[in-house]
Image (tube, rainbow, N blue to C red):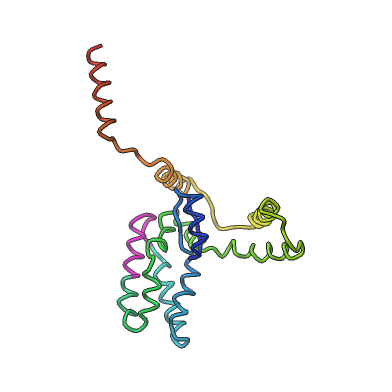
Amino acid sequence: MLVISDGAPGLIGAAEQVLAKSLRQRCLIHRARNVLAKVPTVAQAEVKAEFWKIFDDIEAEPGQAAVDVARGRIAAFEKHYGTTYPAAVKCLTADVASLTVYLRFPKEHWKRIRHSNFIERTFGETRRRVKVIGRLPGERSCLPLVWAVLDRASKGWRGVKHTPSTTRLLVDIRRQLMEPPRSITPTDSHQREEVETVTAVA
């Protein structure tokens, strides 16, 4: 249901192709680094604090209400820093939709699903193992290795707890993504009228 990534075009393209129905959350930690790279060193602490104020302590319920709160804070950030640090503001506002996707999910999960850091630690472990091998003969030999690293790492992941309310929300989101309501087309309407007519005649 959710893909969390940085802005790598290849990774985004792969996710859109393989997981076309999933939502995509832009990693907030990567985005914070991108924004701060466009701010002078002396002002980075201040801007960093203001950046995280956008996404922290949102009291609204998950869904559009929470997204609207974050968007309002982004607009305030833009108004405050637009003249002083226009490049940083442009970096923040370039893809607002993907920065707030996590707010549709259960509030209990927000701090864990708004960044990709928990999985990035596995990259170093994968590199370490590949370095010992030297060279992988092909994709088939690489996949089991990556899978083993992820499987081992996932046993230590914490922070995504499920309750009846979080499960209900996740089920609703899954239904919206995987089984969207089908609109009645003119053909469907015509066929339905024919069935109703036949039933009436019978």
Can you tell which quarter of the image residue 81 is in?
bottom left
* Residue 100 position (above or below residue 38): above
Position of the C terminus, as image quadrant, is top left
* Residue 71 position (above or below residue 187): below
Q: Residue furthest front?
A: 137
Residue at the location (66% across, 53% down)?
139
The magenta segment: 59-74
Q: Position of residue 151 (x, y in %)?
A: 66, 53
Residue at the location (44% across, 72% down)?
52
Front one among 130 and 62: 130
Q: Residue furthest top?
A: 202
* Residue 138 position (above or below residue 185): below
Q: Position of residue 184 (x, y in %)?
A: 28, 35
Q: Main secondary structure of the magenta part?
A: helix
Q: Position of residue 104 (x, y in %)?
A: 40, 55
Residue at the location (42% across, 63% down)?
99
Left or right? Give the position of 62 relative to 33.
Answer: left
Can you tell which quarter of the image residue 35 is in?
bottom left
* Residue 67 in magenta stretch: yes
* Residue 63 position (above or below residue 132): above
Q: Position of residue 32 (x, y in %)?
A: 46, 73
Residue at the location (28% across, 25% down)?
191
Q: Residue furthest bottom?
A: 42
